[in-house]
C-alpha cells in the first residue's frame, strides 16, 4: 500500500510537466494551430526558469520568465503559421531545433549548478485524507496550479463566450470571420498562451523535479505531450489522465531501477515511448470505428480570407 | 453601392457595379454562375475589400475592413454554405459572435430568444441539436435565425433555394416576405427566373461582372430577364431522344452504406439501369446521394446488399474493378475527387489509364508520349481550352475542368456513368455542353445514373426518375413528362405517392 | 489611406527561388551572431573559423563530403515519403537500427569475405530499416495513426535499443567502459579513398539520387505516390491503393536511412557505439525541405549542411562552442526559409488612396 501510494504520488509529480505542455497544446490546437515545437519550448522554459531562479532566487520571477520566453517563441510560430500561412509541421520542427540548440548553447555555464527550487507544500486539511491526501495534496504549488488549470480550462471551453470563440475558430475560421470576430487575433492569442504553458512545463522540470539544468533534460516529453493531445481528444480532463499515466510509467521505471531489477535500464527507458505509440494506436482504432469525434476540423489549415482556389 | 470593382488573378469579377436596397424591399440580384453576384455580396458583408467603389448605408459612407464593420452596420449574409460550425449545437452557433452576451454564457436566455424568433417567423429549429445532425433545410433555418438574432437590417440571401425542395422553398418565401414586412431590406440572389419573378420587388441583372440594368417586377418577364442575363437568346431545350433501353448494365440490390461519421446514409436501395437510359436520382443533397455514388464506384463498401455490373458481382470491388468494367464517375467535387489540381492535363488523363499495358513500358515505366498523344486527341474532341498539355489543371476554368473530366471518363465508351451534379457551378454554355454530351453518350449505349438536386436538370434529361429521401427511394417516376415539380417536391420531402410506387425491376421485364 | 494588397503569384520568378534561400541563410547567420554575441564570442571570428575548418583544406572538404553522404541518402529517404505527404521524422532511428542490424551481421555471420560480408550487412540493414519504417507506415495506412509521432517515438526506442547492446551484451571488454562494440574486422569495412574518410557510400548516394529521379518521373509507382501526395481522394478513385503504398514508401524510406546508418559504422567508425549519429536524420528533414524534394537540390543542400557541420566541429575545437550551435543555425535557416515561402507565393503591393 505504502509503495502504491508513493508511486501514485510520483506519477502526479512526473506527469505534471507533461500536463502543462499538453494543456498548452490543447489551447493552441483548439484554435486550429498545430505547434510541434513543444520540445524546444519546454527546453527553453526549463533553461530560462532555471537561469532566473539561479540568479535572482525568486521562483515567481523564474516562472514568469519561463512563461514569457515560451510565449515569445510561440509568437514566432504564430507569425509564420497564422500570418504567412507557412507549413505548421516544418515550423514546429524548426522551433524544436532552435530551442534544443539554443538551450544547450546558452545553458552551458549552468550545467552542474543547483538551486533551491520549489518545495513541497502540503495542503492543510486535504493532505490528511487517507490515500487521496498523499497522492494528490502533498505536492508543490505548481501541481495544485495544474489542478486549477485543468478544471478551469474545462469550464472555460464549454461555458464561456471566449471558450466558444476558441472552439469555433479551430473548427470553422470562416464562420468566425463571418460573425465579425477576428480569427487571426484568436489564433495568435492561444498559440502564444499555449507556448507559455509548455515553457512552464519545462520550467517544472528544472525548478521542481531535478532542481538542476541539463542539456536535453526534457528527453522527448514535448513529443509525448503532442501525442497526449490526441489521446485527450482535445479535452483538459483527459489530458490530466494521460499525463499521470505517463508519469506513472516513468515513476515505476525509476523505482524498478532503484530496486535493482535485472531488466537493463535502456529497455526500461523505452517504455514511455512504446506506450505513446500504443496509446495513439488505441485512440486511432477507436476513432476509425466512428466512436470518437476527431481533431478540430481546421487544425493545421491556415486561414486566408480572400483566397480563391 | 457605387462603382464597385474587384478582380481575382487579374480578371474583373466586379466592374463598376452599382446596387441599392431599401427597407422593406426584396431586391433580387440576378445573373448566371460567375456573373459576380457572390463577389459583390461578399464585398457588402465585408469579407472582400473592393479595389474601387463606395458603400453608403442610410446615406453615410462606410468602409468595411472586415465582416465586423458590416455586421455593426446591420448587414447580415446567408452564405451558400451557411458558415455554421458543424460540431456545435444550434444555440452555440447562434450565440457565436454576439458581443453583448456576458462572459459566462447565458444558455437558457439564448435558447429562449431562439424560440421567440422561430415563432415569429415560422422557422422551427431545435436549439439543443448539434448542427451536423441537421438536414440542409434545417441548417438554413438556423443560419437565418442567427441573422435575425443579430438584428441584421439588410439580409443578403445567397441562392437560398438551391438546396431546398419546392415546398421548402415556398415556405422560405413566406419567411422572406414576413421579414420584408417587418422592415428588413432583403437582397435575394438567384439565377432561377421563376422564383425571381415570384418574390422580387425589383430585379438587378449582372452579366460578366457588370450591371446590365434594374427593372421593377411589373416590367419584368421571363424572356426579358433571360435576355438580360445571357445577352442573346439561346434555346435551353435539349432533345431527349426516344427511350429505347437495352440490356441491363447496372443492378443494385438492397444496398446499405455508412457515411463518414458511421451513420447509415443509404438504407436499402435497389434499382436497375439499362443501356441507353438516363435514370435520374432526385433529392435534396445530403440524403445519401454521395454515399450511393461512392458505393457504385468502389470508393465505399456497402455493409450489405449487392451491386452487379453487366451481371458481375462487384459489391466489394475497389475503384479499379469498377473501372475495368467500364464504370465511369463524374463526381460533384471536381477538384476534390475528380481531378488533381496541381497535376497537368496529361497526368490527369493518365489517372484512368496509366496502369494499362498499352500505356506502360515493361509494365514498370509509364509511356508518357503515348499518354500525351491520347490526351491531345481527347482535348481536341471535347474542346478543352488550354495553353498546353503540361498546364496545371487548377488554372483552368470550371467549365474546362469539367470538360477534361468528361473527356477522361467517357473516353473508353463506358457501360455505366455515375454523374453527380455534373453541371454544378458551370455557366450556361458549359452546362448546355455537358448535358448534350451526356445525352449523346446515352445514345451510344451507356446507362447513365444522374444524381442531382437540380430539378430542371433531372426533368430535362431523365428517362426515369427515382426520388431519394433519408437514404431510401420513396418513389419512381416512369414518365418524367407527366410529373409536376410539386409531386417531386413532396417525394423529396419524404412523402410516398400512390401514383409513383417503388418497384423492383424484374429480370423478365428486360429484353 | 494606403493599403497593402496581397495577391497570389501566378508563377514564381526563377530568380526568386535562388535569392530567397540565400537571403534566408544570410539572415539565419546574422541572427545566430546575436546569440554568439550574448555568449561573448566574436561572430566574425566564428564564421571565419567555420569556413576555414570546412573549406580551408582538402581534409576539411573531404570531411564535408563525409557528412554529406548520410545527409543525401536520408534526405532522399525523407523526400520520398514526403512526395506522398507522409512525414518520416524517423530517419534518425532508422539510421541507428540499420547500424544495429549490420553490426549484428558482423557479429553473427561466419564469413570472412569482404564482398559477401558487406552484402549481408546491407541486406540486414535494409530489412531492419524497412521494418522500422514499415511499422509507422502500416499504422498510418491502416488506422491513420499520426506518423510524425510514431516515427519520432521509434527514434527514441531505436536509440535506446542500440544503447542496450553497446552498454550490455555487445560491449567491448577492452573499451575501458566506453559504450561501444569491439572494432569490426577489415572485411566488414567499406573501402575509403585517398587517405580520407570518404567511403564507398558516396557512390551509393549518387545512385540513390539518380534512381529517385527516375522513379518519380518515369515509373508507375512514382506517379502513384505523387498522385496520393497531391490528392488522396482522387488517387483513391484512380484505383491507387493507399495502405500498400504508405507501407511501401515508409519501408523504402526506412531502408535507405538504414543503409546510411550502415555506412556510418562500416565506413567511418568501424564499430557500433552510443550516439554515433550527430542528428543526421533530423538534418535530413531540413535537407529535403530546402531542396523542395528535388534530387540535385538535395545534393547541394546536403553539401551546404555538411559545411555547417564541419564548421561547427571546428568551432567546438578552437572556440569550445558546443555542437548545439550547428542545430541553432539549421533551425534558424529553416525558419527564415519558411517565412520567405510566403513571398515566393504571394506578391505584396501597396495601394495608395482611400479605396477609390
Image (cartoon, coloured by chain):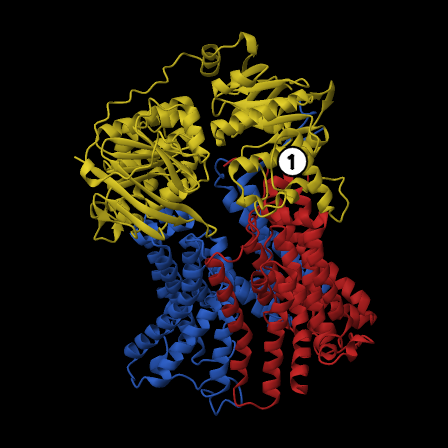
For the N terminus of chain B, the quadrant is top right
User: Residue at coordinates 63% horizontally, 79% vertically from top-left?
Assistant: A251
Q: Which chain is yellow?
A: B
User: Residue at coordinates 78% horizontally, 77% vertically from top-left?
Assistant: A127
Where residue A204 appears, x then y in whole percent? 71, 70
Is residue C220 shown left or right of residue A283? left
- Taking depth in this image into account, of B269 and A260 the one nearest to the observer is B269
Where residue B110 appears, x then y in whole percent? 71, 41
For the C terminus of chain B, the quadrant is top left
Q: Is residue A77 above or below residue C104?
A: above
Q: Which chain is blue?
A: C
Q: Secondary structure at mark 1?
A: helix
In the rendered image of this protein, which colour is used for chain A?
A: red
Determine which residue is flagged by label 1.
B146
Where residue B194 appears, x then y in whole percent? 48, 18
Would residue C320 be visible to someone looking at this image? yes
Would residue C55 be visible to someone looking at this image? no
Q: Chain of mark 1?
A: B
User: Residue at coordinates 62% horizontally, 25% vertically from top-left?
Assistant: B51
Q: Residues within 10 Å of mark 1 (few under 14, many from 20)?
A: many
Q: Is residue B128 above or below residue B229?
A: below
Q: Is residue B491 above or below residue B85?
A: above
- Taking depth in this image into account, of C259 and B288 the one nearest to the observer is B288
Amino acid at each position: 500500500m505504502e509503495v502504491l501510494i508513493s508511486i501514485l504520488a510520483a506519477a502526479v509529480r512526473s506527469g505534471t510537466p507533461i500536463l502543462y505542455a499538453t494543456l498548452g497544446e490543447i489551447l493552441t490546437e483548439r484554435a486550429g494551430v498545430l505547434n510541434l515545437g513543444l520540445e524546444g519550448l519546454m527546453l527553453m522554459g526549463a533553461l530560462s526558469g532555471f537561469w532566473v531562479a539561479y540568479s535572482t532566487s525568486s521562483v515567481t520571477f523564474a516562472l514568469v520568465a519561463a512563461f514569457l520566453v515560451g510565449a515569445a517563441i510561440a509568437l514566432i510560430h504564430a507569425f509564420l503559421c497564422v500570418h504567412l500561412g507557412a507549413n505548421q509541421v516544418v515550423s514546429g520542427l524548426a522551433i524544436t531545433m532552435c530551442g534544443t540548440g539554443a538551450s544547450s548553447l546558452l545553458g552551458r555555464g549552468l550545467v552542474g549548478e543547483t538551486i533551491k527550487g520549489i518545495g513541497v507544500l502540503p495542503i492543510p486539511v486535504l493532505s490528511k485524507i487517507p490515500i487521496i491526501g498523499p497522492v494528490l495534496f502533498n505536492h508543490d504549488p505548481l501541481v495544485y496550479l495544474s489542478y486549477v488549470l485543468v478544471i478551469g480550462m474545462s469550464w472555460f471551453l464549454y461555458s464561456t463566450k471566449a471558450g466558444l470563440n476558441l472552439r469555433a475558430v479551430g473548427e470553422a475560421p470562416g464562420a468566425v470571420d463571418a460573425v465579425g470576430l477576428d480569427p487571426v487575433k484568436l489564433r495568435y492569442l492561444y498559440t502564444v498562451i499555449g507556448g507559455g504553458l509548455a515553457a512552464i512545463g519545462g520550467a517544472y522540470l528544472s525548478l521542481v523535479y531535478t532542481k538542476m539544468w541539463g542539456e536535453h533534460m526534457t528527453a522527448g516529453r514535448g513529443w509525448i505531450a503532442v501525442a497526449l493531445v490526441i489521446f485527450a481528444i482535445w479535452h483538459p480532463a483527459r489530458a490530466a489522465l494521460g499525463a499521470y499515466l505517463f508519469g506513472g510509467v516513468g515513476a515505476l521505471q525509476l523505482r524498478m531501477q532503484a530496486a535493482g531489477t535485472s531488466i537493463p535500464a535502456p529497455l526500461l527507458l523505452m517504455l514511455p515511448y512504446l506506450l505513446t505509440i500504443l496509446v495513439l494506436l488505441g485512440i486511432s482504432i477507436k476513432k476509425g470505428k466512428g466512436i470518437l469525434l476527431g481533431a478540430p476540423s481546421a487544425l493545421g489549415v491556415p486561414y486566408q480570407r480572400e483566397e480563391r482556389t | 453601392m457605387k462603382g464597385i470593382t474587384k478582380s481575382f488573378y487579374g480578371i474583373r469579377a466586379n466592374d463598376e457595379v452599382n446596387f441599392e436596397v431599401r427597407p422593406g424591399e426584396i431586391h433580387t440580384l440576378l445573373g448566371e454562375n460567375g456573373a459576380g453576384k457572390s463577389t459583390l455580396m461578399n464585398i457588402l458583408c465585408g469579407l472582400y475589400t473592393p479595389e474601387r467603389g463606395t458603400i453608403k448605408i442610410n446615406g453615410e459612407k462606410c468602409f468595411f475592413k472586415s465582416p465586423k464593420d458590416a455586421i455593426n452596420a446591420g448587414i447580415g449574409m446567408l452564405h451558400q454554405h451557411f458558415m455554421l460550425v458543424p460540431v456545435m449545437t444550434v444555440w452555440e452557433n447562434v450565440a457565436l459572435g454576439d458581443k453583448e452576451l456576458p462572459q459566462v454564457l447565458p444558455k437558457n436566455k439564448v435558447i429562449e430568444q431562439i424560440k421567440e424568433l422561430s415563432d415569429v417567423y415560422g422557422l422551427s429549429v431545435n436549439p439543443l441539436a448539434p448542427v451536423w445532425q441537421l438536414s440542409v433545410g434545417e441548417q438554413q433555418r438556423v443560419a437565418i435565425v442567427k441573422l435575425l438574432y443579430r438584428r441584421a437590417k439588410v439580409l443578403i440571401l445567397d441562392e437560398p433555394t438551391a438546396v431546398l425542395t419546392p415546398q421548402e422553398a415556398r415556405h422560405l418565401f413566406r419567411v422572406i416576405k414576413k421579414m420584408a414586412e417587418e422592415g428588413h431590406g432583403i437582397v435575394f440572389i438567384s439565377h432561377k427566373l421563376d422564383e425571381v419573378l415570384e418574390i422580387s420587388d425589383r430585379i438587378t441583372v449582372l452579366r460578366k461582372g457588370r450591371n446590365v440594368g434594374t427593372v421593377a417586377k411589373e416590367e419584368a418577364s421571363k424572356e426579358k430577364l433571360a435576355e438580360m442575363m445571357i445577352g442573346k437568346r439561346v434555346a435551353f431545350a435539349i432533345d431527349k431522344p426516344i427511350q429505347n433501353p437495352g440490356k441491363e448494365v447496372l443492378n443494385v440490390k438492397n444496398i446499405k452504406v455508412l457515411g463518414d461519421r458511421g451513420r447509415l446514409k443509404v438504407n436499402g436501395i435497389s434499382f436497375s439501369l439499362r443501356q441507353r437510359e438516363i435514370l435520374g436520382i432526385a433529392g435534396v443533397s445530403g440524403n445519401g446521394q454521395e454515399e450511393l455514388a461512392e458505393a457504385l464506384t468502389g470508393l465505399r463498401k456497402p455493409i450489405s446488399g449487392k451491386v452487379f455490373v453487366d451481371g458481375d458481382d462487384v459489391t466489394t470491388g475497389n475503384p479499379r474493378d469498377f473501372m475495368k468494367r467500364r464504370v465511369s464517375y463524374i463526381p460533384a467535387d471536381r477538384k476534390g475527387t475528380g481531378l488533381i489540381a496541381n497535376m497537368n492535363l496529361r497526368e490527369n488523363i493518365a489517372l484512368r489509364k496509366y496502369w494499362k499495358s498499352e500505356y506502360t513500358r515493361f509494365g514498370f515505366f509509364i509511356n508518357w508520349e503515348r499518354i500525351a498523344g491520347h490526351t491531345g486527341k481527347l482535348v481536341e474532341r471535347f474542346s478543352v481550352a488550354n495553353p498546353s498539355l503540361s498546364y496545371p489543371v487548377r488554372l483552368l476554368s470550371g467549365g474546362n475542368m469539367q470538360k477534361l473530366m468528361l473527356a477522361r471518363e467517357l473516353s473508353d465508351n463506358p457501360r455505366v456513368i455515375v454523374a453527380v451534379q455534373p453541371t454544378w457551378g458551370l455557366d450556361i454554355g458549359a452546362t448546355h455542353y455537358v448535358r448534350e454530351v451526356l445525352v449523346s453518350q446515352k445514345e451510344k449505349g451507356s446507362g447513365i445514373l444522374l444524381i442531382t438536386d437540380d430539378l430542371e436538370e433531372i426533368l430535362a434529361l431523365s428517362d426515369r426518375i427515382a426520388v431519394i429521401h433519408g437514404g431510401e427511394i420513396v418513389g419512381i417516376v416512369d414518365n418524367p413528362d407527366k410529373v409536376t415539380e410539386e409531386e417531386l417536391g413532396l417525394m423529396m420531402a419524404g412523402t410516398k405517392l400512390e401514383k409513383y410506387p417503388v418497384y423492383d425491376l424484374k429480370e423478365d421485364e428486360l429484353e | 489611406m494606403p493599403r497593402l494588397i496581397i495577391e497570389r503569384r501566378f508563377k514564381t520568378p526563377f530568380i526568386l527561388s535562388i535569392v530567397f534561400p540565400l537571403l534566408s541563410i544570410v539572415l539565419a547567420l546574422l541572427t545566430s551572431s546575436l546569440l554568439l554575441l550574448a555568449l561573448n564570442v566574436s561572430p566574425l571570428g566564428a564564421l571565419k573559423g567555420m569556413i576555414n575548418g570546412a573549406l580551408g583544406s582538402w581534409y576539411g572538404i573531404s570531411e564535408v563530403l563525409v557528412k554529406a553522404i548520410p545527409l543525401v541518402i536520408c534526405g532522399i529517404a525523407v523526400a520520398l515519403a514526403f512526395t506522398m505527404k507522409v512525414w518520416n521524422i524517423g530517419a534518425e532511428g532508422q539510421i541507428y537500427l540499420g547500424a544495429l542490424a549490420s553490426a549484428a551481421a558482423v557479429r553473427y555471420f561466419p564469413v570472412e569475405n569482404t564482398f559477401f560480408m558487406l552484402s549481408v550487412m546491407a541486406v540486414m540493414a535494409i530489412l531492419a530499416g524497412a521494418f522500422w519504417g514499415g511499422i509507422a507506415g502500416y499504422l498510418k495506412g491502416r488506422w491513420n495513426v499520426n506518423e510524425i509521432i510514431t516515427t519520432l517515438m521509434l527514434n527514441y526506442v531505436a536509440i535506446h535499443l542500440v544503447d542496450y547492446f553497446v552498454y550490455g551484451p555487445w560491449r567491448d571488454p577492452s573499451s575501458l567502459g566506453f559504450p561501444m562494440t569491439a572494432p569490426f574486422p577489415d572485411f566488414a569495412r567499406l573501402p575509403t579513398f585517398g587517405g580520407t574518410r570518404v567511403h564507398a557510400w558516396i557512390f551509393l548516394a549518387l545512385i540513390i539520387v539518380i534512381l529517385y529521379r527516375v522513379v518519380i518521373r518515369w515509373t508507375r509507382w512514382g506517379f502513384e505516390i505523387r498522385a496520393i501526395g497531391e490528392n488522396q481522394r482522387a488517387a483513391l478513385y484512380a484505383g491507387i491503393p493507399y495502405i500498400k503504398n504508405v507501407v511501401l514508401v515508409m519501408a523504402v524510406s526506412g531502408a535507405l536511412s538504414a543503409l546510411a546508418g550502415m555506412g556510418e559504422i562500416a565506413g567511418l567508425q568501424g564499430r557500433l557505439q552510443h550516439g554515433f549519429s550527430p542528428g543526421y536524420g533530423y538534418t535530413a528533414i531540413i535537407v529535403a525541405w530546402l531542396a523542395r524534394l528535388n534530387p540535385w537540390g538535395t545534393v547541394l543542400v546536403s553539401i551546404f549542411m555538411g559545411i555547417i557541420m564541419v564548421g561547427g566541429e571546428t568551432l567546438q575545437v578552437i572556440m569550445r562552442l558546443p555542437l548545439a550551435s550547428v542545430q541553432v543555425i539549421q533551425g534558424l535557416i529553416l525558419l527564415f526559409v519558411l517565412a520567405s515561402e510566403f513571398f515566393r507565393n504571394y506578391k505584396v503591393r501597396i495601394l495608395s488612396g482611400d479605396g477609390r
